[in-house]
């Protein structure tokens, strides 16, 4: 991965929301707090974590749907700063939203919804060219031409998500943020939509940031996976490597909860149950945000946030256990001795 030039670079990205806590008093809710990663051309980077960890906020902030509080975003090596930069970037980057029921305008026909990005960016010379582009986009996602004059309420959830994907493809982007695009769909429809994402990636050379909480889906479609916890990035690695042998204690707990299709392996798999509730991002704990639920937490974890550092080639972990140079085996041994 490191040999390629990244398509998207996110450095120290922050997104804070001011929350009113009393009369004329506000407190920052740190939804995304100092995260950094790179996405390379043609790859799919998965972003996973529990509900409320900041995944969706990170995706929306990268596209400036939320204005970043701090940090830097680069596209093809160029920092995006001005309104002109963002407008140009939005010609190459777009988003598929989670809920196909609320992300489509019920008053617009399918043709108008898909054609709206073409109108905004003036991407056609005549009405006939506009119509041809819309029909081609519909064909890409498996919709028929007779669907063009219909409205969103006339379609199933899977078909609505296809409309949303066609709309995202309208500007001919090379980067798409997919915000849990299959979580609202039936399982059988999920497989169809996931396979379509893979097919479109091969045909159009797309790059994805795939936000999800279903780890089986993420492993299937993603090249690398980044794990978030309470606004922080705690681990980043190749998808198979992270799923088979996670390093961070939180990643281990996540992976242990994934249902396995083989009953023998499932029975031998030891579920790691985390104690306590997720702290509020409005009042996050000091130091490592996971220390309140971590079975390996030490005194340093309560005082200092560990840096995300490369512990193996293309493998990044933010954990003080690795700061101390402890191997995965020695961590497990220490835990057994404590018990």
Image: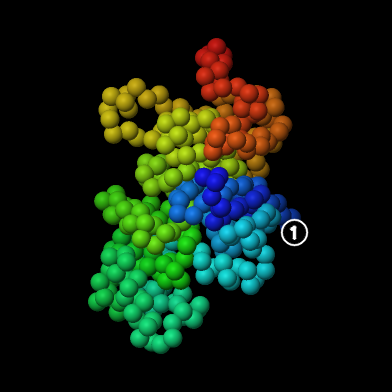
Tell me if residue 77 comes above or below residue 308 in the rendering: below
Looking at the image, the residue that sits furthest to the top is 337
Q: Closest to the observer: 221 or 268? A: 221
Q: Position of residue 89 (x, y in %)?
A: 57, 67
Residue 70, above or below 3: below
**Above/below status of 32 relative to 328:** below
Check disc 1 and report the residue beneath it.
24
**Residue at the extreme right:** 24
**Considering the numbered disc 1 on the image, is that residue within a helix, a strand or a loop?**
loop
Q: Nearer the viewer, residue 99 or 326?
A: 326
Q: Position of residue 73 (x, y in %)?
A: 62, 57
Choose between 199 and 179: the one closer to the eye.
199
* Viewer can see residue 289: no
Residue at 44% from the left image edge and 40% from the top image edge: 239
Residue 51 pos. (x, y %): 49, 46
Say above or below: 27 vs 261.
below
Which image quadrant for residue 262? top left
Specify the color scheme. rainbow
Residue 204: quadrant of the picture: bottom left
The answer to whether residue 237 is seen in the rendering is yes
Q: Residue at x 37, y 57 (%)?
A: 202
Say left or right for 87 vs 207: right
Can you name the residue that lies furthest to the front here? 3
Seen in the image, is 112 located left or right of residue 176? Answer: left
């Amino acid at each position: 991965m490191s040999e390629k030039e990244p398509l998207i670079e996110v450095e120290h990205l922050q997104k804070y929301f001011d929350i009113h806590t009393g009369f004329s008093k506000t407190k920052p809710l740190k939804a995304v707090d100092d995260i950094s990663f790179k996405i390379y051309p043609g790859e799919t980077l998965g972003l996973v974590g529990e509900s409320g960890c900041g995944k969706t906020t990170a995706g929306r902030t990268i596209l400036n749907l939320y204005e970043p509080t701090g940090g830097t975003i680069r596209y093809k090596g160029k920092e995006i700063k001005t309104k002109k930069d963002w407008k140009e970037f939005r010609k190459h980057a777009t988003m598929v939203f989670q809920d196909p029921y609320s992300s489509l305008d019920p008053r617009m026909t399918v043709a108008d919804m898909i054609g709206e990005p073409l109108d905004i960016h003036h991407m056609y010379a005549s009405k006939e060219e506009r119509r041809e582009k819309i029909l081609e986009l519909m064909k890409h996602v498996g919709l028929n031409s007779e669907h063009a004059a219909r409205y969103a309420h006339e379609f199933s959830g899977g078909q609505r998500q296809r409309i949303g994907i066609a709309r995202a493809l309208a500007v001919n982007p090379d980067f798409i943020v997919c915000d849990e695009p299959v979580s609202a769909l039936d399982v059988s429809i999920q497989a169809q939509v996931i396979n379509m994402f893979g097919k479109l990636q091969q045909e159009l050379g797309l790059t994805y940031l795939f936000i999800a909480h279903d780890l089986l889906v993420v492993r299937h479609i993603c090249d690398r996976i980044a794990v978030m916890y309470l606004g922080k990035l705690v681990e980043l690695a190749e998808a198979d490597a992270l799923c088979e042998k996670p390093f961070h204690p939180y990643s281990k707990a996540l992976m242990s909860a994934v249902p396995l299709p083989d009953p023998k392996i499932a029975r031998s798999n030891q579920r790691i149950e985390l104690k306590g509730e997720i702290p509020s991002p409005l009042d996050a704990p000091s130091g490592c945000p996971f220390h309140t639920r971590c079975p390996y937490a030490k005194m340093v974890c309560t005082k200092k946030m560990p840096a995300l550092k490369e512990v193996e080639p293309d493998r990044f972990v933010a954990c003080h256990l690795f700061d101390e140079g402890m191997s995965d085996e020695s961590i497990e041994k220490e835990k057994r001795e404590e018990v």
